[in-house]
Image: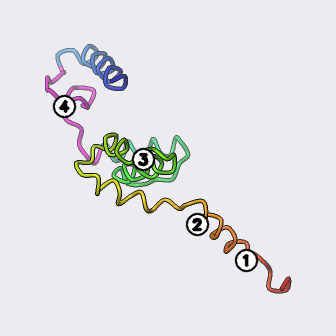
Amino acid sequence: MTALKHRRRTQEEARKAAGAKWKNSNLVFTTRNGTPIEPRNFNRSFEVQCRKAGVPRIRVHDTRHTCASLLAALDVHPRVAMRILRHSQISMTMDVYPQIPSPETRKALDRLNASLDTDESDR
């Protein structure tokens, strides 16, 4: 709710700034003139924000998967994650959870990595 209230305030400021150019709609996310955001423009803006944040560029849809992975890594209960992600079925959420490596898997991969980093002459 906090984010939506913030968005409403931001949109109200844009409406005032646009004046007569403002196009009324029931949309939450609009351009500065109230018109729908074109997907290509949104994707370009997303890429700019990724560059500014210094994070790797990923597809917008992949942010959803990242969120699910982070929730799983933080041990958030799958039913709670399901509600956050707005999945209609728990099976959709559970498809993501098994992809999070367990501590044992991480240890095994660390050992494998260490063995591959060892110089052949050290053996």
Q: Residue shown at 35%/60% (left/top)?
A: 95
Q: Earlier in the sequence, mark 4 or mark 1?
A: 4
Q: Residue shown at 28%/43% (left/top)?
A: 86
Q: Amino acid type of disc 4?
A: Thr
Gap in angstroms between the C-alphas marked 2 and 3: 21 Å
Q: Quadrant of the C terminus?
A: bottom right
Residue 115 location (% of width, % of height): 73, 77
Residue under numbered circle 2: 105
Q: Is residue 77 left or right of residue 30?
A: right
Tell me which segment is drawn in magenta.
21-41
Q: Is the residue marked by circle 2 packed among few (<14), some (14-19), or many (20+) residues within 10 Å?
A: few
The circle drawn on residue 35 is 4
Majority SS type along the magenta span: loop
Residue under numbered circle 3: 67
Q: Amino acid type of disc 2?
A: Thr
Q: Earlier in the sequence, mark 3 or mark 1?
A: 3
Gap in angstroms between the C-alphas marked 4 and 3: 28 Å
Depicted 123 relative to depicted 74: above or below? below
Residue under numbered circle 1: 115
Residue 15 location (% of width, % of height): 24, 18
Q: Residue shown at 34%/40% (left/top)?
A: 84
Depicted 34 relative to depicted 60: above or below? above
